[in-house]
Image (cartoon, grey):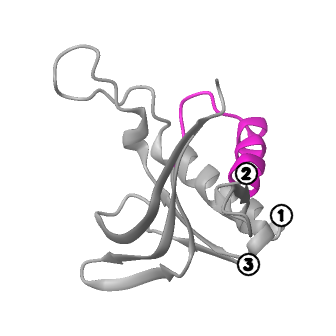
Amino acid sequence: MKALVQRVNKASLSVNGVLISEISKGLVCYLGIGKGDTEKDLLWLVKKVSGLRIFSDENGKMNLSIKDLNLEILVVSQFTLYGDVKKGFRPSFIEAELPDVANKMYEQFCSELEKVGIKKVSKGVFGADMLISQENTGPVTIMIDSKC
């Protein structure tokens, strides 16, 4: 399971011109579910994302998490994190989980974030063509892989 996490001042997500989700200061988490990912991977990644210390403390050091600051998160399903371009230029997505299984894990990931105390967990629309606007800060972008 992979997560690409970006620190933002704000973010919004629309589908077909309709606003679906928006957050203020917090994180945008692009979540990729791979074949063979388990609940253990999911729970480990929830802990990592929710505890990731990438917000500045009073001394300007990245030392605080979204939980520490009571911030928000937008979680977007992103099978393309499993895109493989080792051969050629067209990505292969054979390592991405099948949609029905991936959707269940995506929903569980969001539920688990709420259980660990994230104040607002916003979501995209699984499988939809989404338009995402975000104002990154830093920029701070972290890739987390449960298999590494």
Q: CA distance from mark 1 to mark 2?
A: 8 Å
Left or right, 148 with respect to 19, comes to right
Q: Nearer the viewer, residue 63 or 68?
A: 63
Callouts 1 and 2 close, C-beta under 8 Å: yes
What residue type is disc 3 on? Answer: Lys
Q: Where residue 78 sits in the image (x, y, percent)?
A: 43, 49
Residue at 47% over, 59% down: 138
Residue at 47% over, 80% down: 21
Left or right, 54 with respect to 31, comes to right
Is label 3 in a helix, a strand or a loop? loop
Few, some or many residues within 10 Å of mark 2 (<14, 14–19, 20+)? many
**91 above or below 56?**
above
Query: N-terminal of the two: label 1 or label 2?
Result: 2
Residue at which label 1 appears: 116
Q: Where residue 86 sits in the image (x, y, percent)?
A: 29, 15
Query: Which residues are drawn in magenta?
Result: 31-51
Q: CA distance from mark 3 to mark 1?
A: 9 Å
Q: Residue placed farthest to the front in the image?
A: 59
Is label 1 in a helix, a strand or a loop? loop
What residue type is disc 1 on? Answer: Val
Few, some or many residues within 10 Å of mark 3 (<14, 14–19, 20+)? some
**136 above or below 53?**
below
Residue at which label 2 appears: 46
Residue at which label 3 appears: 119
What residue type is disc 2 on? Answer: Val
